[in-house]
Image: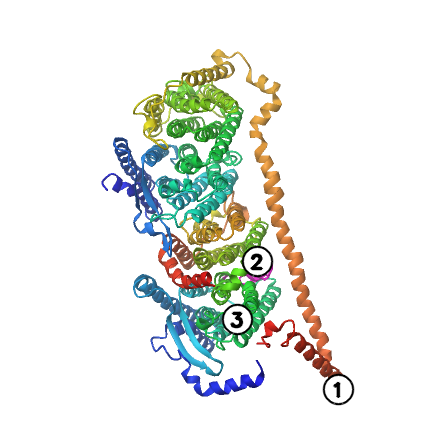
Amino acid sequence: MNLPALVGQLGAAIPSGATVPGANSSFGFPLLSLIVWLPLVGALVILMLPNRSENDHGRIKNVALVFTFIPFFLTLIAVYVTVFIDLGVSYSGGFRYEENYNWLGVFGAQYHVGVDGISLPLVLLSTLLFFVATMASLNTKTRVKEYFFLLLVLDIGVTGVFTAMDLLLFFIFWEIELIPMFLLILIWGGKRRVYAAWKFLLYTIAASAALLLAILVLYFKGGAHTFDMTVLSQSHLAPALGGTLFWLFFLCFAIKLPVWPLHTWLPDAHVEAPTAMSVLLAGVLLKMGGYGMIRICVGFFPAAAKYYSLAILTLAVIGILWGGFAALAQDDMKRMVAYSSVSHMGFVLLGISALTPLALNGAVFQLFAHGIVTGSLFLLVGLVYDRAHTRSISELGGLAQRMPYLTVAWVIGALASVGLPGFVGFVAEFEIFLGSYGAHHIGTLLAVFGVVLSAGYLLWMLERVFFGPLKEAWAKLKDPTAIELFYMYGMLAIVFLTGVLPGKLTQLIDYAIAPLTQRLGGS
Amino acid sequence: MAAPYSLMYLIVLLPLVAFAVMFGLTYENKRVSAWLGILAVAGADVISIWALISELQKPIHIQYGLGPFSDFLRFADVHFSLGILADPLSAMMVVVVCSVSLLVQVYSLEYMKGEEGFVRYYAFISLFTFSMLLLVLSTNYFQTYIGWELVGVCSYLLIGHYFKRPAAAAAAKKAFIVTRFGDFPFFVGIAFIFFRFHGHMGGAADLDFYAISPLYHAGLVSQGGLFVMAMLIFSGAVGKSAQFPLHVWLPDAMEGPTPISALIHAATMVVAGVYLVARTYPLFAANPTSLVVVASLGALTSVMAAIWAVAQDDIKRVIAYSTLSHLGLMMFGLGVGAYSAAMFHLFTHAWFKALLFLGAGSVIHGVHTQNIWEMGGVGKRMKITTWCVAIGSFSAAGIIPFSGFWSKDGIMASVFATANPVFIAAAIVITFFSALYTFRLFFVVFTGEPARRRAFDPKKIHESGAYITVPLIVLAVLAAFIGFTGLPGSKQGFGQFIFFGKHPEVEAINYIAIGVSLVVALVGVTVAALFYWPRFQRFSAPAFNARYARHYDWSHNKGYFDEIYQALFVRGLVLRAGQATAWFDKNIVDYFVDGLADGYQLASERLRRLQGGRVQGYAIGLFAGVVAIAVVALVFGSSGPLSVVSGVGR
């Protein structure tokens, strides 16, 4: 590719930009755009509100609540229609709620959004968690205006990533997410927030650089000269180019997921971030990595994914065991949950490495499951910390006697994280392990040992923090307030319901996974 | 499909509803909650007995999906289902589970009266009963695993009932984690089975027991593969049924309330492992080597536990080791091919062991201690309890004509039939020690004079109330007479109802096995009497123990397995590994990351100097840039080594 040719092509593209195939193909209700962009409206409203008194703070919080609730509600409608009405009737795969507008036609870039079985559960997850995170932030006292402004901007980036069907759009949403989270940790974080925030930023920028490079190489060398992800997912690249691109994309998503040994930003960022941000980091931001791996690494380069399956498996197993063992050694509850995330996201990678329909289905389901379960765990850590002002497992003890409702929630959350049947995590783990066994016998055996470890660190923590005699220092702790109980048990209810009736959701996911695995078989 | 089979889903549903109502609506009302649990399980029990009677009249295999859960996961070509399975084996098991649960709940009305967390206790019993029934009525490995994990967690919750006591909290955690060590290979085993047989299910749901059983012989898996498969599944049974080397959790589980020990840790959950092996017996039968392992491990567990039981001082622990020993015996039986006898022993054991635990509970209720040396003379004050425990003891020790004798005799006959001297010796040792520890307990607790204890008036000991004694009497009747349902040589006995493979011929009675086991058991009782029954005492137990102090200590400390595991695995391996990974992250990975960041900072400071405004500097830079571009062009250019990445050559 030389420069004159590129310029010539640009020139040729300009007049025909409006007639790019697929452009403006949807004139329906812009549901996804509303879900993605409504938080921006909220953010702008907040910018205009005064920020002086308690009253003003209340108003800002209400605006944030409204503008995170509406996207959640709209997503619920979309999920309800898709899963309970259309699934298997009028819907059997492909993207829904598509919007395709001409955007940067010269480059072949479109404003193209849509959801399928892989992204819809994640959009539901993120809109839900943003609403919950807003509720969990209601007692914020410093710099209220900036906090909720950034939270809403973060929302745009995350939901955008899950809905974008255009790679350039995907990249832009990916970048939007970065700075708000950096600032949210830097300003509202704990004692070591500066270190943690910069560490998060450095890692994420490295990821972005890899992503940008990968996108550019794909655009210029891939031959299609398009950013359209549906087109790109059908292209056949030379093995060497495919392999290189696979690893470039993988590097970016591996930092986000995170994959061992790129994981050390995670414990620091999670521990220092305020509760709501830990919930979002673990619940949603990590999922961007897993989503990218499935959508792009596997979706675009199935041959490479298959070829490097063993390498990915190795990383997955190391991550699962590493995270599990490290979690055992932690004294900080939040750090323990953070390391458990490293372990549990290893299950996602295991599913991806196996590439069977069942394992990939499990990987997507685990993204959803882990988001909701670990999100709940971070909320629960926050509720302990708010009252005791410490997260040290060895300092706490006997809390069950003072906080029965919180203890019940903790036991449920911990058991869900352990992968107990009846909760959503079990379904995901079951699918992943059964699906991956055929591809990797020994690898799966080692990975399943991670389940023993998670029982180890979680139940040991429960024993030391909640059971046994009550330590005197905690004799005056009080159970959570009504609103805290509401979102806490609300989350756990979802953990339970999706764990007991996962059938429809897995069917929805399968509609998106099936074409992927068909390509794997064919290539 | 007619009743009662069409109603069997209610067996599972009723306890679940009771659990939900207790936690959701009646949590504040103790009376209503408790009776709700009792009524629910009574309803389930009625249907169970009805189903058992139908099966007895006409043995049949029926299975159907459990409403919306029959398609728990169904997409592409996978189908995981929950269902109800009715056949003689499951019909027998549901009756055991529902009946023991019912009796235990009635018993708990008095035993747990006034205890903190009364409704929580009843709610968890209902949840446990539901989970156990889900497991027992399972149609496939998937459902079995679900029930398996759920009973495990109920056990965790109920062992930890007195969670303020550190010992109880620790025991609960230990039980859960140790059994998980068995569960994870079990899980892998299920994955293995799925991998091999998926695609050969012929319309049945994946992992279906009945659909898979002919496939083991279909040549889809090699003998080596079958052995691995069987061992992986067996690992789950080893954890749940507390077989060596995962036996360490069961004695500690006695920290839970005594009725829980009777229900979960004697009659139902701990036999789930035995039930699993029985349910998947076609797999084990397809690979005879695996059965040898089952038999050996069962025998080893049984022998060791029987020896340890003789040196315990806590009434519940003695019975716990007795349970371990009997569970080992059941495995032993399955291993030597005594399928019917092992199931029969499971059946009789449920009654007499529940009886022993509940009887022990009644004694504890009366004397407020669990140490047998602080008891003594209870017999005169608690007549009903004493007679009931006596029947239970005769049964457990294997004395004719009590139920334990008949079931144990079936296993003995098969062990003798193997003509394996090690197995026969093991069986004799088990029989001897069973009788010895059972009657050691009985004589120490119930005969002689009350032990003197501070602030305790032995005259205040009195018989427990009706809620405790009536379940005891019911269980005593069962423990005494249920054995006659499986008399050797009978044409309509247990062995003609629950069996493996073809319908069995009526077997000839093995009088040698009967004679040997009876004589050995009677010797055991006699030895116990000579040591511990004051009226017949000829030897001093303390003197004997002191003389063989090393042996006694080994037995008293259960072979030091807890200490070894703690040092080797918990402290040595797991925690070390945890600390090592955490250290590595902090000092190696982060060292590089932070170093990289520092390097960045340093580099940017240096780079700033480049823009010093000196023209010569810029000129050098310009020249260096040209050179760099040239190098890049050479390397990445059309003929360069990395032309693929840049694609220039295309």
Helix, strand or loop under label 1: helix
| Residue assigned mark 3 | A180
Instruction: Give the quarter of the image for residue A98.
Output: bottom left
| Residue assigned mark 2 | A311
Residue toward you, A249 or B76? B76
Whether residue B396 is visible here, answered yes or no, is no
Amino acid type at circle 1 is Val
The residues bearing labels 3 and 2 have C-alpha atoms spaced at a distance of 34 Å
- Is B307 one of the magenta-colored residues? no
| Residue assigned mark 1 | B615
Q: Residue A444, which numbered label?
A: none
- Is A258 one of the magenta-colored residues? yes
Q: Are marks 3 and 2 in contact (CB under 8 Å)?
A: no
Mark 1 or mark 3, which is nearer to you? 1
Q: Is residue B72 above or below residue A164?
A: above
The residues bearing labels 2 and 1 have C-alpha atoms spaced at a distance of 50 Å
